[in-house]
Amino acid sequence: SISELNTMQGFCAVASDSDCSSSFTKILIKGGTVVNAHHKEVADVYIEDGIIVSVRPNIKVGDEVKIVDATGKYVMPGGIDPHTHLEMEFMGTVMIDDFFTGQAAALAGGTTMHIDFIIPVNGSLSAGFDSYIKKAKNAVMDYGFHMAITKWDEEVAKDMELMVKENGINSFKFFMAYKGALMVNDELLMQGLVKCKSLGALAMVHAENGDAIAEGQKRMIDLGITGPEGHSLSRPPVLEGEATARAIRLASFVNTPLYVVHVMSIDAMEEIAVARKAGQRVIGEPVVSGLVLDESWLWDPDFTTAAKYVMSPPIRKAEHGKALQAALTTGTLQPFCDQKLSEFGQRHSPFSQQILNIFSVLLVGTDHCAWNSTQKALGIDDFRKIPNGVNGIEERMHLVWDTMVESGKISVTDYVRITSTECARIFNIYPRKGAILEGSDADIIILNPNATFKITAASHHSRSDTNVFEGMTGKGKVEVTISGGRVVWENNKLNIMPGSGRYIRMPPYGYLFDGIDKADAAYLASLHAPVHRTKAAA
Ligand code: URP
Ligand code: ZN
Ligand code: ZN
Ligand code: ZN
């Protein structure tokens, strides 16, 4: 209940509370470096009623305006997390963060919008949609939805159309893993790709070979390996590479864009890079856990510690995270990438050296799916029963800044692109989201590059009692978050209002569909070219 939420430490959930400044509808952010994906400049940003009204130097305002000083700091679009699971029912339990705590965590970490995955209820998309709209009624920031497709019949096909045309959903996820639960076979995936294409909706895949994983799990259990390390050993990178390659080739056959969620391995990334180099519209989404963690934790002798790192696809050996970091970089910082590539380039396909240093992957998500340690303990005797998933919604913006920008791998403008703008473009809500431009929603963060952050379960805002990034520190701290034109995070305190978050409808036919019709027309025309055959002799 709301009163329960009010008593949570550090929260101010009532608009009229004297501490809260949510009554300010006019805000001036002064003197910061305003960063967009395409450009940065020192300027002021003036906000009124949730919308950015003006971006230029030396804006003058009256007394009724809240002034936020950003001198020496970066003023950037709030993060958009393309991949979260709040209050998801999964593996016999319910994920510990709901839309209130998950979004509170997001705002404290500089993320102002997320796109969550609706899981159908008994295969029904409409029932799933209704249930998630209910789950989100205490939302404190804007959110959108992808929808999973877990079975196939006439009703599902009809409902997909309804979701796109009436309900603002423009992406559908197909699980190629989780056999016996969410997994779909190639026949369903093929039907789904065709339907997605016909609706201008983006097909997304969880790319791991679920049948082979079942075999890998049996192998581990037969060997007596029942602990969390069995999770990694039972589903190696080759099974992620195989499924990624299969999905990419099927999407090529249908000629429709594809989005590969949580890319965790070099194997999968190489497939994406090769396809992109050949001109196919494939997006790969690394997640922050995959970028900065390595699998060694799964061998920790303490079960609670090891189990918190169980997610699918698994967190891999460190070289995979390093390669994914390199894939996020652009040609502008080429020498760095080439130097780094030599560390692992030889170990993988001869393509690596040539292909990793293009825009192989364009954005970073989290796959935030947090459990507490009692839930993880469901798998104390059998790694197959450990709820899959790790946190990240609060940590992504800080860790990506420290790992990518503070280290000199990417520019500040690229940071905005990979944490916000590209997600808004792909899901067709740019420039309402993902930009600091006149007319854009006032979802803004102020990051101090000279301040430090430290991550601990004791201080985070997720309900989970653990954090996979426990103890990590770095440079660059989100000091202010503005969501929907209200200051919701300032002086390390949240000031949020349940119900203030809005559902953001995402229209179909995003930029990834541009030109698909022309390519199809050219292909069809080529089929109708007459074939001249000589008549067979009678
Ligand atoms: O382990 C994970 N990734 N849990 C969330 C569900 C999914 O596959 O995205
Ligand atoms: Zn997944
Ligand atoms: Zn490079
Ligand atoms: Zn996920």
Image (cartoon, rainbow, N blue to C red):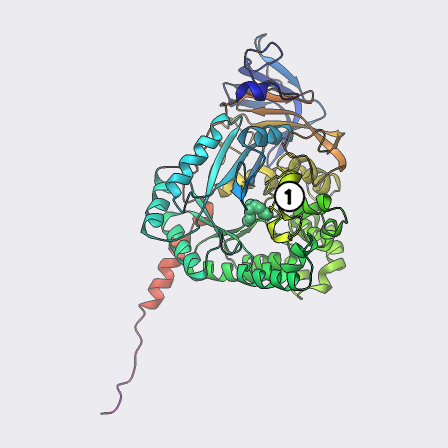
Residue furthest left as drawn:
538
> Which residues are drawn in magenta?
531-538
Q: Is residue 78 visible?
A: no
Q: Position of residue 124 (x, y in %)?
A: 38, 44
Dominant secondary structure of the residues highlighted in magenta in the image = loop
Residue furthest bottom as drawn = 538
Whether disc 1's CB lies below 8 Å from ligand 1 is answered no
The foreground one among 303 and 275 is 303
Q: Quadrant of residue 101?
A: top right
Q: Which residue is mark 1?
A: 376
- Residue lying farthest to the front in this orientation: 381
**Closer-to-camera residue (209/400):** 209
Amino acid type at image mark 1? Lys
Is residue 236 shown left or right of residue 336?
A: left
Picture mark count: 1
Residue 172 in percent (x, y) is at 45, 47
Does the stretch in magenta take in 181?
Answer: no
Q: Residues within 10 Å of mark 1 (few under 14, many from 20)?
A: many
Q: Position of residue 120 (x, y in %)?
A: 43, 44
Image quadrant for the C terminus?
A: bottom left
Q: Is 215 on the left or on the right of 118, as rendered?
A: right
Mark 1: secondary structure: helix
Q: Residue at x 34, y 42 (%)?
A: 162
In this rendering, position of residue 234 left or right of residue 48: right
Q: Is residue 44 visible?
A: yes
Residue 22 position in % (x across, y down)? 56, 15
462, above or below 117, in the image: above
